[in-house]
Image (spheres, helix red, strand yellow):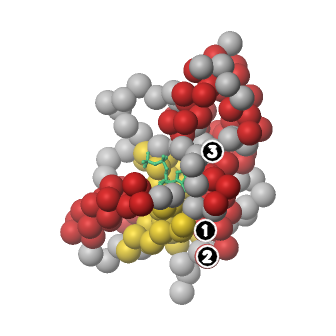
Amino acid sequence: MIRRAIYPGSFDPPTNGHLDIIERGAKMFDHLIVGIGVNSEKAPFLSVEDRLQLLTECCSHLPNVEVMSFDGLLVHFAKEQNSTVLLRGLRAITDFDYEFRIALANRSLAPDIETTFLIASEEFSFLASSVVREVARLGGDYGKFVPEPVARCIAARLA
Ligand code: ADP
């Protein structure tokens, strides 16, 4: 049986914490799709095209990882991609309530799709895209929180 999973998120911007989950997830599944959810209601920090290109570059050492964007319902995207597993990361108890509700909603919509969680690595457990955006906007050193290509892209965007 080929195990196919989707790791969905906004990845705005992708962080070292995301990459950690991707690398660990790539060991658990035969094929892992990093799915960038397109939210047309919110103006993004980085464009979908930038996030797609950056994540593809950051995952180039992982042959079983594919990066795609999607709009619409996650469970529809999962079905289109023949994936029966959704992978998410859990940083702290504060993530739990949100993740629990989304996982139950997705199970209600698609009972054959399972959500599974990886606990964040300690060194990244504080790290969120929103922290990176805030540090970047306020002129702080965001370079330690994101992969090198992402740092370059943020620098160009803020220039
Ligand atoms: P969304 O926009 O869907 O809330 P994000 O793009 O911020 O999500 O993150 C995607 C997934 O990665 C979520 O499950 C989130 O909890 C997880 N995640 C984000 N940052 C980290 C981190 N530093 N360590 C582990 N998991 C993380």
Q: Residue at x 32, y 30 (%)?
A: 41
- The residue indicated by pointer 3 is 15
Which sits in the foreground, 82 or 37? 37
45 over 128 or under it: above or below: above
Q: Quadrant of residue 95?
A: bottom left
Q: Is mark 1 within 8 Å of ligand 1?
A: no
Are there few (<14), some (14-19), or many (20+) residues within 10 Å of tag 2? few
What is the CA distance from the residue labelled 3 to the residue labelled 2?
20 Å
**How far across and down, in percent of the image, does residue 17 sit?**
62, 52
**How far across and down, in percent of the image, does residue 126 sit?**
57, 49
| Cβ atoms at labels 1 and 3 below 8 Å apart | no
Looking at marks 1 and 3 on the same chain, the residue that comes earlier in the sequence is marked by: 3
Seen in the image, is 156 located left or right of residue 70? right
| Cβ atoms at labels 2 and 1 below 8 Å apart | yes
Which sits in the foreground, 13 or 60? 13
- The residue indicated by pointer 1 is 25
Looking at marks 3 and 2 on the same chain, the residue that comes earlier in the sequence is marked by: 3
**How far across and down, in percent of the image, does residue 51 sit?**
58, 38
Q: Nearer the viewer, mark 1 or mark 3?
A: 3
Seen in the image, is 32 located left or right of residue 103? right
Quadrant of the rendering where the N terminus is positioned: bottom right
Q: Quadrant of residue 37?
A: top left
What secondary structure is marked by label 3? Answer: loop
Amino acid, disc 2: Met
Q: Nearer the viewer, mark 3 or mark 2?
A: 3
59 over 140 or under it: above or below: below
Amino acid, disc 3: Thr
- The residue indicated by pointer 2 is 28
